[in-house]
Image (cartoon, rainbow, N blue to C red):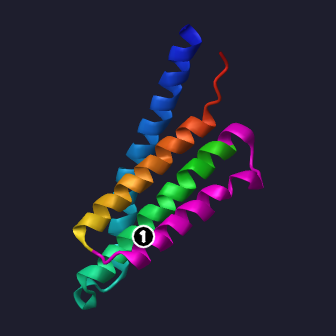
Amino acid sequence: MDKFIIWIIKIIMIAVAGIIVYFIGGWIVKDVVYSMIDIDTKTLADLYKYDFYIYTAIAALYPCIIHSIKDGISGEYIFNIVWIVAIYGIIIFIFPISMGITILWNIVNIGWIILNAFLLCEPDF
C-alpha cells in the first residue's frame, strides 16, 4: 500500500510541475514572442496561432525533457512531439479559431502532460 501511495504522489508531483511549467513558461515565452513581433498589424486569430505554437511546443518538449532526465537521451520519446503536433494539426485546421478552441487546446495539452506523468512513473508494487 505504501508503494502505491508513493507512486501516486510521484505522478501528482510530475503532473503539477508540468502544469506550472506549461502556464508560467508559456506566459514568459509568449511575452518574449509578442515583444518581437508587430502586434498592431496582427489580427486576433494570428495571435491565437502564436499561442497555439508556443503552448504546443511546451506541451511536447516538457515530457521529452523529463523522460530524458530519467532514462537518458534516446529517440523513443519522439512520439511526444509527433502526437501532440498531429493533434494540433487536427484541432487547428478543422475547427475555427475561437475562445472555445483555446480552452479545448489547453485541456488537451494539460491532459498530455498528465498522461506522460503516468508513462514516466512505472508502478513498482
Out of 14 and 122, give the one closest to the viewer: 122
Circle 1 sits on which residue? 91
Quadrant in which the C terminus appears: top right
Q: Is residue 95 magenta?
A: yes
Residue at 61% in and 39% down = 119
SS at circle 1: helix
Q: Is residue 59 magenta?
A: no
In the rendering, at what x and y percent does residue 13 appear? 46, 31
Q: Residue furthest top?
A: 1
Residue at 50% in and 35% down = 14
Out of 33 and 111, give the one closest to the viewer: 111
In the rendering, at what x and y percent does residue 84 appear? 53, 61
In the rendering, at what x and y percent does residue 118 appear? 56, 36
Within 10 Å of disc 1 (Cα), the crowding (few <14, some 14-19, many 20+) is: some
The answer to whether 10 appears left or right of 91 in the picture is: right
Residue at 25% in and 65% down = 100
Quadrant in which the N terminus appears: top right
Out of 33 and 12, give the one closest to the viewer: 12
The answer to whether 125 appears left or right of 102 in the picture is: right
Which span is picked out in magenta? Answer: 69-97
